[in-house]
Image: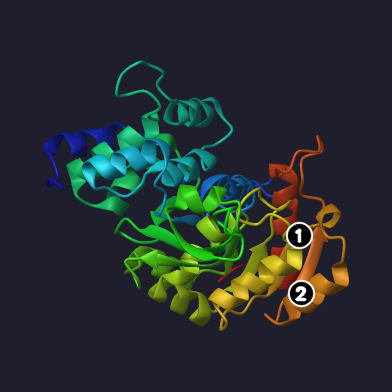
Amino acid sequence: MTGRTPRLGRLRRMAPEGRTGRPVEARGGKPRRRGTQPKVVALGGGMGLSASLTALRRITGDLTGVVTVADDGGSSGRLRDELGVLPPGDLRKALAALCGDDDWGQTWARVIQHRFQSQGEINGHAVGNLLIVALWEQLGDHVQALDLVGKLLGAHGRVLPMSAVPLELQALVKGHDPARPEDVDTVRGQATVALTTGEVQSVHLVPPDPPAVPEAVAAVLDADWVVLGPGSWFSSVIPHLLVPELLDALTETKARRVLSLNLAPQPGETEGFSPQRHLEVLGRHAPKLALDVVLADEAAVPDRDSLTDAAKRFGAAVELAPVARPDGTPRHDPELLAAAYDRIFRMHGRIGPWR
């Protein structure tokens, strides 16, 4: 990556003021005072993390998204292979989720999510991916570049990669080859793991024990609440627990920790999983991890007692709430999810101003 150029200083002066830390409206329309908002860090990737961030920005202005960097498919995979950069796609989605509901925010959300359609090499690339990678090359600093994009978008929060090196996700999968249903194979690549028809038994990262981004570790240690999930369980949620410095921070932080479960098993990697099985595989990958709350949609939990027992092994209480969209699709409703998080923060958090 190259060093900073003078033109970027002018770009900073032209960009609108970022909204990170800006007081948001509490229920009733009155702005919360500074110092009364919880510091929240949400970890994940893809559409699951986007759902959490879209909800959380409605209840706090002190918000950080920490994103997996193992994607190897689509536009992200192509840029990663060609330029050796971090895959920008999940980072872009997280930034779009933090855009406000005003004209500025929604316009920029659409722009960075826009994909080119052509018969040439640019086909399928997202505008936001190209913008992020361009700033990485200009600034030579992943965090500074993402902060600058967030400022341009007027993002309600900050987005950080979990590691500064591109990672490969590998999984041990039983029955990946339907012709050998009892054999266990190593499956390489996040995109392949997410679509496997076999039973994922465990995942690991290459290189092993990758370094965490220091700002991500600091955010977790300084948080009031840490939210893990929802999202692709093996390819977006669990990878955060495979970065030693990040797992140590999750274990040592004084923040309270909430695990947000998916609305339904995902075809491929979690086909047939019950809510409690999601917890069991999480525990196998991070046996020392403690949780305070497990959030699940009430309609997605057929056996509450089994989920309660599984949550107790983490030291967590179970909170059931309607968080799915009313149209029946397995997607979170931002307003309902925001209400559920807000209630959890108030019921299980400290009384009075945060910090």
Residue 283 or residue 289, whichever sits in front: 283
276 versus 332 height, above or below: below
Residue under the point 70% across and 50% down: 338
* Residue 3 appears anywhere in the view: yes
**Left or right of 170 on screen, residue 317:** right
Mark 2 to mark 1 CA distance (whole Å): 11 Å
**Left or right of 78 on screen, residue 305:** right
Question: Residue 110, image x and y in percent?
Answer: 49, 27
Assess whether mark 1 and mark 2 are in contact (beta carbons under 8 angstroms): no
As drawn, the label of residue 296 is 1
The kind of secondary structure element at disc 2 is strand
145 versus 274 height, above or below: above
Q: Which quadrant of the structure image shows residue 305?
A: bottom right
Q: Quadrant of the C terminus?
A: bottom right
Circle 1: is it few (<14), some (14-19), or many (20+) Cα within 10 Å?
Answer: many
Residue 259 or residue 159, whichever sits in front: 259
Residue under the point 73% across and 75% down: 311
Circle 2: is it few (<14), some (14-19), or many (20+) Cα within 10 Å?
Answer: some
Residue under the point 61% across and 60% down: 181
Question: Residue 339, image x and y in percent?
Answer: 74, 52
Indicate the amino acid at tag 2: Ala
Residue 103 or residue 326, whichever sits in front: 326
Instruction: Report the coloring of the rendering.
Output: rainbow
Q: Which quadrant of the structure image shows residue 246?
A: bottom left
Question: Residue 104, image x and y in percent?
Answer: 49, 27
The residue beneath circle 2 is: 317
As drawn, the label of residue 108 is none
250 versus 161 height, above or below: below
Question: Residue 299, image x and y in percent?
Answer: 85, 53
Indicate the amino acid at tag 1: Ala
